[in-house]
Image (cartoon, rainbow, N blue to C red):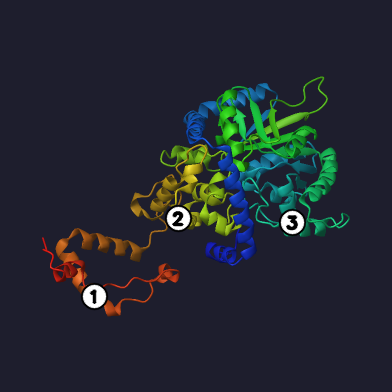
Protein backbone atom coordinates (compact mmCIF):
# COMPACT_ATOMS: atom_id res chain seq x y z
CA UNK A 1 0.00 0.00 0.00
CA UNK A 2 1.53 3.29 -1.09
CA UNK A 3 1.06 6.32 1.17
CA UNK A 4 2.44 9.81 0.75
CA UNK A 5 1.43 11.30 4.10
CA UNK A 6 3.34 10.38 7.26
CA UNK A 7 2.16 8.10 10.05
CA UNK A 8 1.88 11.15 12.33
CA UNK A 9 -0.27 12.96 9.75
CA UNK A 10 -2.63 10.00 9.48
CA UNK A 11 -2.87 9.71 13.27
CA UNK A 12 -3.71 13.40 13.63
CA UNK A 13 -6.31 13.19 10.85
CA UNK A 14 -7.96 10.21 12.55
CA UNK A 15 -7.94 11.85 16.00
CA UNK A 16 -9.60 14.96 14.55
CA UNK A 17 -12.41 12.92 12.95
CA UNK A 18 -15.26 12.72 15.47
CA UNK A 19 -17.51 10.77 13.09
CA UNK A 20 -14.80 8.13 12.74
CA UNK A 21 -14.53 7.80 16.53
CA UNK A 22 -18.28 7.37 16.83
CA UNK A 23 -18.42 4.75 14.07
CA UNK A 24 -15.60 2.68 15.53
CA UNK A 25 -16.56 2.99 19.17
CA UNK A 26 -20.10 1.70 18.62
CA UNK A 27 -18.91 -1.04 16.26
CA UNK A 28 -16.12 -2.26 18.57
CA UNK A 29 -18.40 -2.26 21.62
CA UNK A 30 -20.93 -4.37 19.69
CA UNK A 31 -18.31 -6.86 18.50
CA UNK A 32 -16.72 -7.22 21.93
CA UNK A 33 -20.13 -7.86 23.49
CA UNK A 34 -21.01 -10.44 20.83
CA UNK A 35 -17.75 -12.29 21.39
CA UNK A 36 -18.17 -12.20 25.18
CA UNK A 37 -21.65 -13.70 24.89
CA UNK A 38 -20.30 -16.64 22.87
CA UNK A 39 -17.69 -17.52 25.50
CA UNK A 40 -19.53 -17.52 28.84
CA UNK A 41 -17.39 -20.35 30.24
CA UNK A 42 -13.76 -19.25 30.66
CA UNK A 43 -12.51 -22.80 31.20
CA UNK A 44 -14.06 -24.00 27.92
CA UNK A 45 -12.67 -20.97 26.13
CA UNK A 46 -9.17 -21.61 27.48
CA UNK A 47 -9.40 -25.25 26.39
CA UNK A 48 -10.54 -24.28 22.87
CA UNK A 49 -7.76 -21.69 22.60
CA UNK A 50 -5.22 -24.31 23.66
CA UNK A 51 -6.45 -26.70 20.97
CA UNK A 52 -6.52 -24.02 18.25
CA UNK A 53 -3.07 -22.79 19.22
CA UNK A 54 -1.68 -26.33 19.18
CA UNK A 55 -3.07 -26.96 15.69
CA UNK A 56 -1.54 -23.78 14.31
CA UNK A 57 1.78 -24.46 16.04
CA UNK A 58 1.84 -27.92 14.49
CA UNK A 59 1.22 -26.43 11.06
CA UNK A 60 4.16 -24.06 11.45
CA UNK A 61 6.45 -26.73 12.88
CA UNK A 62 5.83 -28.93 9.84
CA UNK A 63 5.20 -26.18 7.29
CA UNK A 64 7.52 -27.41 4.53
CA UNK A 65 6.26 -30.99 4.67
CA UNK A 66 2.61 -29.91 4.80
CA UNK A 67 2.99 -27.59 1.82
CA UNK A 68 4.54 -30.36 -0.26
CA UNK A 69 1.72 -32.69 0.73
CA UNK A 70 -0.87 -30.01 -0.03
CA UNK A 71 0.59 -29.47 -3.49
CA UNK A 72 0.50 -33.20 -4.21
CA UNK A 73 -3.13 -33.50 -3.10
CA UNK A 74 -4.24 -30.44 -5.02
CA UNK A 75 -2.55 -31.63 -8.19
CA UNK A 76 -4.13 -35.07 -7.80
CA UNK A 77 -7.49 -33.29 -7.46
CA UNK A 78 -6.86 -31.62 -10.85
CA UNK A 79 -6.07 -28.24 -9.30
CA UNK A 80 -3.02 -26.47 -10.72
CA UNK A 81 -0.60 -25.16 -8.07
CA UNK A 82 1.64 -22.10 -8.48
CA UNK A 83 4.31 -20.84 -6.06
CA UNK A 84 4.91 -17.10 -5.77
CA UNK A 85 7.81 -15.68 -3.80
CA UNK A 86 6.79 -12.02 -4.12
CA UNK A 87 3.66 -9.95 -4.68
CA UNK A 88 4.76 -9.06 -8.22
CA UNK A 89 5.34 -12.70 -9.07
CA UNK A 90 1.88 -13.62 -7.77
CA UNK A 91 0.24 -10.88 -9.83
CA UNK A 92 2.09 -11.93 -12.97
CA UNK A 93 1.07 -15.56 -12.48
CA UNK A 94 -2.58 -14.58 -12.05
CA UNK A 95 -2.45 -12.30 -15.09
CA UNK A 96 -0.95 -15.04 -17.23
CA UNK A 97 -3.67 -17.50 -16.17
CA UNK A 98 -6.35 -14.95 -17.06
CA UNK A 99 -4.64 -14.09 -20.34
CA UNK A 100 -4.41 -17.75 -21.35
CA UNK A 101 -8.13 -18.13 -20.62
CA UNK A 102 -8.94 -14.87 -22.44
CA UNK A 103 -10.63 -13.69 -19.23
CA UNK A 104 -11.48 -9.98 -19.21
CA UNK A 105 -14.08 -9.72 -16.42
CA UNK A 106 -13.42 -10.96 -12.88
CA UNK A 107 -15.59 -11.31 -9.79
CA UNK A 108 -13.65 -11.49 -6.54
CA UNK A 109 -14.56 -12.71 -3.09
CA UNK A 110 -13.14 -11.13 0.05
CA UNK A 111 -9.40 -11.73 0.30
CA UNK A 112 -6.81 -9.91 2.39
CA UNK A 113 -3.99 -11.61 0.49
CA UNK A 114 -5.12 -10.03 -2.78
CA UNK A 115 -5.25 -6.69 -0.95
CA UNK A 116 -1.69 -7.39 0.18
CA UNK A 117 -0.43 -7.87 -3.37
CA UNK A 118 -2.63 -5.04 -4.72
CA UNK A 119 -4.14 -7.35 -7.31
CA UNK A 120 -7.03 -5.06 -8.23
CA UNK A 121 -4.75 -2.20 -9.22
CA UNK A 122 -2.43 -4.53 -11.10
CA UNK A 123 -5.21 -6.08 -13.20
CA UNK A 124 -6.93 -2.76 -13.84
CA UNK A 125 -3.67 -1.49 -15.32
CA UNK A 126 -3.87 -4.49 -17.68
CA UNK A 127 -7.42 -3.45 -18.74
CA UNK A 128 -9.04 -6.32 -16.87
CA UNK A 129 -12.26 -5.50 -15.02
CA UNK A 130 -12.25 -6.84 -11.45
CA UNK A 131 -15.25 -6.41 -9.16
CA UNK A 132 -15.38 -6.93 -5.40
CA UNK A 133 -18.50 -8.92 -4.50
CA UNK A 134 -18.43 -8.87 -0.69
CA UNK A 135 -20.87 -6.07 0.18
CA UNK A 136 -18.40 -4.19 2.36
CA UNK A 137 -15.59 -4.57 -0.16
CA UNK A 138 -18.00 -3.62 -2.98
CA UNK A 139 -18.88 -0.34 -1.22
CA UNK A 140 -15.25 0.41 -0.43
CA UNK A 141 -14.32 -0.20 -4.05
CA UNK A 142 -17.04 2.25 -5.12
CA UNK A 143 -15.62 4.82 -2.68
CA UNK A 144 -12.09 4.20 -4.04
CA UNK A 145 -10.84 3.34 -0.57
CA UNK A 146 -9.02 0.49 1.15
CA UNK A 147 -10.52 -1.78 3.84
CA UNK A 148 -10.11 -0.47 7.38
CA UNK A 149 -10.66 -3.86 9.05
CA UNK A 150 -9.69 -7.35 7.91
CA UNK A 151 -13.16 -8.82 8.54
CA UNK A 152 -15.47 -5.79 8.15
CA UNK A 153 -13.87 -3.57 5.49
CA UNK A 154 -16.47 -0.77 5.60
CA UNK A 155 -16.78 -0.59 9.37
CA UNK A 156 -15.39 2.95 9.39
CA UNK A 157 -18.37 4.27 7.46
CA UNK A 158 -21.72 5.31 8.92
CA UNK A 159 -25.03 4.24 7.39
CA UNK A 160 -25.45 7.67 5.84
CA UNK A 161 -21.97 7.59 4.29
CA UNK A 162 -22.64 4.15 2.81
CA UNK A 163 -25.97 5.28 1.39
CA UNK A 164 -24.38 8.35 -0.20
CA UNK A 165 -21.63 6.31 -1.90
CA UNK A 166 -24.12 3.80 -3.29
CA UNK A 167 -26.51 6.49 -4.53
CA UNK A 168 -23.73 8.37 -6.33
CA UNK A 169 -22.80 5.30 -8.36
CA UNK A 170 -26.28 3.84 -8.88
CA UNK A 171 -28.75 6.74 -9.16
CA UNK A 172 -31.24 4.44 -10.89
CA UNK A 173 -32.13 3.00 -7.47
CA UNK A 174 -34.22 5.10 -5.03
CA UNK A 175 -32.11 6.64 -2.27
CA UNK A 176 -32.33 4.78 1.02
CA UNK A 177 -30.43 4.52 4.29
CA UNK A 178 -31.91 1.11 4.99
CA UNK A 179 -28.95 -1.30 4.85
CA UNK A 180 -31.21 -4.25 4.00
CA UNK A 181 -32.57 -2.41 0.96
CA UNK A 182 -29.07 -1.40 -0.14
CA UNK A 183 -28.06 -5.05 0.17
CA UNK A 184 -30.98 -6.08 -2.06
CA UNK A 185 -30.05 -3.44 -4.62
CA UNK A 186 -26.41 -4.55 -4.61
CA UNK A 187 -27.51 -8.16 -5.04
CA UNK A 188 -29.37 -7.25 -8.24
CA UNK A 189 -26.21 -5.66 -9.63
CA UNK A 190 -23.91 -8.49 -8.58
CA UNK A 191 -26.10 -11.37 -9.79
CA UNK A 192 -25.60 -10.37 -13.41
CA UNK A 193 -21.89 -9.88 -12.80
CA UNK A 194 -21.56 -13.44 -11.47
CA UNK A 195 -23.29 -14.87 -14.54
CA UNK A 196 -21.23 -12.85 -17.00
CA UNK A 197 -17.78 -13.13 -15.36
CA UNK A 198 -14.99 -14.95 -17.16
CA UNK A 199 -13.25 -15.88 -13.90
CA UNK A 200 -13.65 -15.83 -10.14
CA UNK A 201 -10.91 -15.08 -7.61
CA UNK A 202 -11.09 -15.90 -3.91
CA UNK A 203 -9.01 -16.16 -0.78
CA UNK A 204 -8.72 -19.19 1.49
CA UNK A 205 -9.21 -19.52 5.25
CA UNK A 206 -7.69 -22.99 5.58
CA UNK A 207 -5.95 -25.31 3.12
CA UNK A 208 -6.03 -28.96 4.24
CA UNK A 209 -2.89 -30.92 3.34
CA UNK A 210 -4.51 -34.31 4.07
CA UNK A 211 -7.25 -33.97 1.45
CA UNK A 212 -6.32 -30.99 -0.71
CA UNK A 213 -9.45 -29.18 0.46
CA UNK A 214 -9.74 -25.38 0.32
CA UNK A 215 -11.98 -23.96 3.06
CA UNK A 216 -13.68 -20.62 2.65
CA UNK A 217 -15.67 -18.93 5.44
CA UNK A 218 -18.29 -16.30 4.49
CA UNK A 219 -21.73 -14.87 5.29
CA UNK A 220 -23.12 -13.54 2.02
CA UNK A 221 -22.86 -16.38 -0.49
CA UNK A 222 -20.73 -14.26 -2.82
CA UNK A 223 -17.73 -16.46 -2.12
CA UNK A 224 -19.68 -19.50 -3.26
CA UNK A 225 -20.83 -17.67 -6.40
CA UNK A 226 -17.27 -16.55 -7.24
CA UNK A 227 -15.92 -20.08 -6.88
CA UNK A 228 -18.67 -22.00 -8.70
CA UNK A 229 -20.35 -19.85 -11.39
CA UNK A 230 -17.44 -18.60 -13.58
CA UNK A 231 -15.63 -21.21 -15.69
CA UNK A 232 -12.28 -20.39 -14.06
CA UNK A 233 -11.50 -20.16 -10.34
CA UNK A 234 -8.22 -18.81 -8.94
CA UNK A 235 -7.63 -19.12 -5.18
CA UNK A 236 -4.87 -17.05 -3.56
CA UNK A 237 -3.46 -17.76 -0.12
CA UNK A 238 -0.44 -17.22 2.07
CA UNK A 239 1.63 -20.35 2.67
CA UNK A 240 0.88 -20.24 6.42
CA UNK A 241 -2.82 -21.07 5.94
CA UNK A 242 -2.14 -24.82 5.58
CA UNK A 243 -3.35 -27.25 8.26
CA UNK A 244 -2.49 -30.91 8.51
CA UNK A 245 -5.86 -32.70 8.78
CA UNK A 246 -9.49 -32.06 7.93
CA UNK A 247 -10.34 -32.60 11.61
CA UNK A 248 -8.10 -29.60 12.45
CA UNK A 249 -10.59 -27.30 10.74
CA UNK A 250 -13.41 -28.00 13.21
CA UNK A 251 -11.97 -26.25 16.33
CA UNK A 252 -10.39 -23.53 14.19
CA UNK A 253 -13.72 -22.73 12.51
CA UNK A 254 -15.50 -22.82 15.88
CA UNK A 255 -13.23 -20.26 17.50
CA UNK A 256 -12.77 -18.18 14.32
CA UNK A 257 -16.43 -17.30 13.81
CA UNK A 258 -17.09 -16.64 17.50
CA UNK A 259 -13.99 -14.47 17.83
CA UNK A 260 -14.55 -12.53 14.61
CA UNK A 261 -18.26 -11.69 14.57
CA UNK A 262 -19.75 -13.46 17.60
CA UNK A 263 -21.50 -16.06 15.43
CA UNK A 264 -21.87 -19.75 16.19
CA UNK A 265 -20.97 -20.31 12.55
CA UNK A 266 -21.07 -18.24 9.41
CA UNK A 267 -23.92 -18.57 6.93
CA UNK A 268 -21.72 -20.35 4.41
CA UNK A 269 -18.74 -22.65 4.85
CA UNK A 270 -17.32 -23.75 1.51
CA UNK A 271 -15.13 -26.83 1.11
CA UNK A 272 -13.60 -26.93 -2.37
CA UNK A 273 -11.68 -30.01 -3.45
CA UNK A 274 -11.66 -29.92 -7.25
CA UNK A 275 -12.98 -28.22 -10.36
CA UNK A 276 -16.16 -29.52 -11.98
CA UNK A 277 -16.06 -33.27 -12.53
CA UNK A 278 -17.65 -35.14 -15.40
CA UNK A 279 -21.40 -35.32 -14.96
CA UNK A 280 -21.56 -32.41 -12.49
CA UNK A 281 -23.73 -29.42 -13.40
CA UNK A 282 -21.87 -26.59 -11.68
CA UNK A 283 -18.44 -25.54 -10.57
CA UNK A 284 -15.50 -24.11 -12.52
CA UNK A 285 -14.04 -26.03 -15.41
CA UNK A 286 -10.51 -25.27 -14.22
CA UNK A 287 -8.92 -24.26 -10.91
CA UNK A 288 -5.61 -22.73 -9.87
CA UNK A 289 -4.12 -22.10 -6.42
CA UNK A 290 -1.45 -19.45 -5.81
CA UNK A 291 0.69 -20.18 -2.73
CA UNK A 292 2.23 -16.84 -1.73
CA UNK A 293 5.36 -16.35 0.36
CA UNK A 294 5.92 -12.56 0.30
CA UNK A 295 8.14 -12.51 3.39
CA UNK A 296 6.48 -15.34 5.28
CA UNK A 297 9.43 -17.73 4.99
CA UNK A 298 11.68 -15.12 6.59
CA UNK A 299 9.26 -14.75 9.49
CA UNK A 300 9.05 -18.53 9.77
CA UNK A 301 12.84 -18.79 10.13
CA UNK A 302 12.81 -16.37 13.07
CA UNK A 303 12.04 -18.57 16.08
CA UNK A 304 11.31 -15.54 18.28
CA UNK A 305 8.74 -14.10 15.84
CA UNK A 306 7.40 -17.23 14.12
CA UNK A 307 4.15 -17.20 16.11
CA UNK A 308 3.05 -14.19 14.04
CA UNK A 309 2.10 -16.71 11.33
CA UNK A 310 -0.38 -18.53 13.58
CA UNK A 311 -2.95 -15.79 12.87
CA UNK A 312 -6.32 -16.98 11.49
CA UNK A 313 -7.44 -13.42 10.55
CA UNK A 314 -10.38 -13.11 12.96
CA UNK A 315 -9.76 -9.43 13.74
CA UNK A 316 -10.47 -9.89 17.45
CA UNK A 317 -7.20 -8.19 18.42
CA UNK A 318 -8.34 -5.07 16.55
CA UNK A 319 -11.80 -5.13 18.10
CA UNK A 320 -10.29 -5.02 21.59
CA UNK A 321 -7.42 -2.60 20.90
CA UNK A 322 -7.93 0.90 22.38
CA UNK A 323 -5.50 2.43 19.87
CA UNK A 324 -7.17 0.88 16.83
CA UNK A 325 -10.57 1.98 18.12
CA UNK A 326 -9.37 5.59 18.24
CA UNK A 327 -7.53 5.59 14.92
CA UNK A 328 -9.29 3.11 12.64
CA UNK A 329 -7.47 0.97 10.12
CA UNK A 330 -6.48 3.58 7.54
CA UNK A 331 -4.23 5.48 9.97
CA UNK A 332 -1.77 2.57 10.00
CA UNK A 333 -1.18 2.92 6.25
CA UNK A 334 -0.84 -0.85 5.86
CA UNK A 335 -3.00 -3.71 4.60
CA UNK A 336 -3.13 -5.33 8.04
CA UNK A 337 -3.83 -2.76 10.78
CA UNK A 338 -4.17 -3.10 14.55
CA UNK A 339 -1.99 -5.33 16.76
CA UNK A 340 -1.52 -8.06 14.15
CA UNK A 341 -0.55 -5.42 11.59
CA UNK A 342 1.95 -3.84 14.00
CA UNK A 343 3.50 -7.30 14.40
CA UNK A 344 3.32 -8.55 10.82
CA UNK A 345 3.94 -5.55 8.58
CA UNK A 346 7.36 -4.38 9.91
CA UNK A 347 8.62 -7.95 9.52
CA UNK A 348 7.39 -8.13 5.92
CA UNK A 349 8.38 -4.64 4.78
CA UNK A 350 11.22 -3.82 7.15
CA UNK A 351 11.66 -1.73 10.27
CA UNK A 352 13.21 1.12 8.30
CA UNK A 353 9.92 1.60 6.49
CA UNK A 354 7.37 0.61 9.15
CA UNK A 355 9.16 0.42 12.48
CA UNK A 356 7.22 3.43 13.75
CA UNK A 357 4.06 1.30 13.77
CA UNK A 358 5.28 -0.36 16.96
CA UNK A 359 4.68 2.90 18.82
CA UNK A 360 0.92 2.55 18.20
CA UNK A 361 0.53 0.20 21.16
CA UNK A 362 -0.14 0.88 24.85
CA UNK A 363 1.02 -2.61 25.94
CA UNK A 364 -2.34 -3.04 27.68
CA UNK A 365 -2.27 -6.73 26.70
CA UNK A 366 -5.90 -6.92 25.50
CA UNK A 367 -4.91 -8.29 22.08
CA UNK A 368 -2.96 -11.17 23.60
CA UNK A 369 -5.78 -12.02 25.98
CA UNK A 370 -8.38 -12.44 23.24
CA UNK A 371 -6.28 -13.96 20.42
CA UNK A 372 -7.98 -17.30 19.65
CA UNK A 373 -4.68 -19.00 18.78
CA UNK A 374 -2.73 -17.45 21.67
CA UNK A 375 -0.30 -15.32 19.69
CA UNK A 376 1.66 -13.35 22.35
CA UNK A 377 1.15 -10.10 20.48
CA UNK A 378 2.38 -7.70 23.21
CA UNK A 379 5.57 -9.75 23.59
CA UNK A 380 6.17 -9.76 19.82
CA UNK A 381 5.50 -6.03 19.49
CA UNK A 382 7.89 -5.32 22.36
CA UNK A 383 10.51 -7.52 20.69
CA UNK A 384 10.15 -5.51 17.47
CA UNK A 385 10.62 -2.30 19.44
CA UNK A 386 13.82 -3.74 20.85
CA UNK A 387 15.04 -4.91 17.43
CA UNK A 388 14.40 -1.43 16.03
CA UNK A 389 17.10 0.11 18.25
CA UNK A 390 19.44 -2.78 19.01
CA UNK A 391 22.11 -1.60 16.58
CA UNK A 392 25.00 -4.06 16.35
CA UNK A 393 22.95 -6.81 18.00
CA UNK A 394 20.17 -6.49 15.43
CA UNK A 395 18.43 -9.61 14.13
CA UNK A 396 19.42 -10.24 10.51
CA UNK A 397 16.03 -11.87 9.84
CA UNK A 398 14.28 -8.55 10.42
CA UNK A 399 15.16 -6.09 7.67
CA UNK A 400 16.22 -2.71 8.99
CA UNK A 401 16.74 -3.88 12.57
CA UNK A 402 18.66 -1.21 14.45
CA UNK A 403 17.72 1.49 11.94
CA UNK A 404 15.68 3.47 14.49
CA UNK A 405 18.60 3.75 16.89
CA UNK A 406 19.30 7.42 17.73
CA UNK A 407 22.68 8.59 18.98
CA UNK A 408 21.37 11.07 21.56
CA UNK A 409 18.86 8.58 22.90
CA UNK A 410 21.54 5.91 23.10
CA UNK A 411 23.88 8.25 24.98
CA UNK A 412 21.08 9.24 27.36
CA UNK A 413 20.45 5.62 28.34
CA UNK A 414 24.16 4.90 28.72
CA UNK A 415 24.44 7.88 31.06
CA UNK A 416 21.38 6.68 32.96
CA UNK A 417 23.04 3.29 33.42
CA UNK A 418 26.23 4.94 34.64
CA UNK A 419 24.39 7.13 37.12
CA UNK A 420 22.13 4.46 38.60
CA UNK A 421 24.83 1.79 38.86
CA UNK A 422 27.30 3.96 40.81
CA UNK A 423 26.20 5.20 44.30
CA UNK A 424 28.67 8.08 44.35
CA UNK A 425 27.72 9.32 40.87
CA UNK A 426 24.01 8.92 41.71
CA UNK A 427 24.47 10.98 44.88
CA UNK A 428 26.24 13.76 43.01
CA UNK A 429 23.62 13.70 40.23
CA UNK A 430 20.77 13.94 42.76
CA UNK A 431 22.45 16.85 44.55
CA UNK A 432 23.01 18.71 41.29
CA UNK A 433 19.48 18.23 39.91
CA UNK A 434 17.80 19.26 43.16
CA UNK A 435 20.02 22.32 43.59
CA UNK A 436 19.53 23.43 39.97
CA UNK A 437 15.88 22.36 39.66
CA UNK A 438 14.87 25.92 38.73
CA UNK A 439 16.58 25.60 35.33
CA UNK A 440 14.89 22.32 34.34
CA UNK A 441 13.22 22.44 30.87
CA UNK A 442 9.52 23.19 30.61
CA UNK A 443 8.98 20.50 27.98
CA UNK A 444 10.83 17.42 26.75
CA UNK A 445 10.32 17.15 23.01
CA UNK A 446 7.37 15.11 21.74
CA UNK A 447 7.06 13.36 25.10
CA UNK A 448 5.92 16.60 26.69
CA UNK A 449 3.33 17.38 24.03
CA UNK A 450 0.58 15.47 25.83
CA UNK A 451 2.13 15.19 29.30
CA UNK A 452 3.12 17.51 32.13
CA UNK A 453 6.91 17.64 32.22
CA UNK A 454 8.15 16.51 35.64
CA UNK A 455 10.27 18.96 37.64
CA UNK A 456 12.99 17.77 40.05
CA UNK A 457 12.24 18.26 43.73
CA UNK A 458 14.17 20.84 45.75
CA UNK A 459 15.43 18.04 47.97
CA UNK A 460 16.60 14.53 47.24
CA UNK A 461 14.95 11.53 48.91
CA UNK A 462 17.99 11.16 51.16
CA UNK A 463 17.73 14.80 52.26
CA UNK A 464 14.02 14.45 52.93
CA UNK A 465 14.72 11.38 55.03
CA UNK A 466 17.32 13.31 57.05
CA UNK A 467 14.87 16.16 57.62
CA UNK A 468 12.28 13.70 58.85
CA UNK A 469 14.75 12.26 61.37
CA UNK A 470 15.20 8.86 59.74
CA UNK A 471 18.49 7.03 60.09
CA UNK A 472 20.47 7.23 56.84
CA UNK A 473 21.30 3.58 57.09
48 with respect to 208 (left or right): left
Residue 380 percent across, percent down from the top left: 43, 46
Which residue does the numbered mark 1 point to in the structure image?
Answer: 458
Which residue does the numbered mark 3 point to in the structure image?
Answer: 162
Measure the C-alpha gap from mark 3 to mark 1. Answer: 59 Å
For residue 362, the mark is 2
- Residue found at x 23% / y 74%: 434
- Residue found at x 55% / y 49%: 318
Which corner quadrant holds the C terminus? bottom left
Residue 170 percent across, percent down from the top left: 84, 55
Pick whichever of labels 3 and 1 is earlier in the sequence. 3
Measure the C-alpha gap from mark 2 to mark 3. Answer: 32 Å
Pick whichever of labels 2 and 3 is earlier in the sequence. 3
Residue 279 percent across, percent down from the top left: 82, 19
Which is more toward the observer, 191 or 406?
Answer: 191
Residues marked 2 and 3 touching at CB (< 8 Å): no
Characterize the local packing of mark 1: few (<14), some (14-19) or many (20 or more) Cα atoms within 10 angstroms: some
439 with respect to 247 (left or right): left
Amino acid sequence: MHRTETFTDRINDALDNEQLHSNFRSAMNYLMEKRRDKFPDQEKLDNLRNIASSIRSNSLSNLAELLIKLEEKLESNNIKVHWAETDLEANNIIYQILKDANAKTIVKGKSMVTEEIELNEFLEDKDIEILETDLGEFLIQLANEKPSHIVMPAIHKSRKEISKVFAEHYPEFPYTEDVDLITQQARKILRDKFRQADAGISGINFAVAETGTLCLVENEGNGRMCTTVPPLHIAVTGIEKVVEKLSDVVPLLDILTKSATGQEITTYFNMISSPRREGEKDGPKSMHVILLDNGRSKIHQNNEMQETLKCIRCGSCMNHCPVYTQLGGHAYGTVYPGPIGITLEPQKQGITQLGELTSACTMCGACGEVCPVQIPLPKLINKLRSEAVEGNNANELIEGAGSMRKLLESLAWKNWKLIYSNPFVYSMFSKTTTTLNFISPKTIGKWGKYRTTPKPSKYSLKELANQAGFDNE
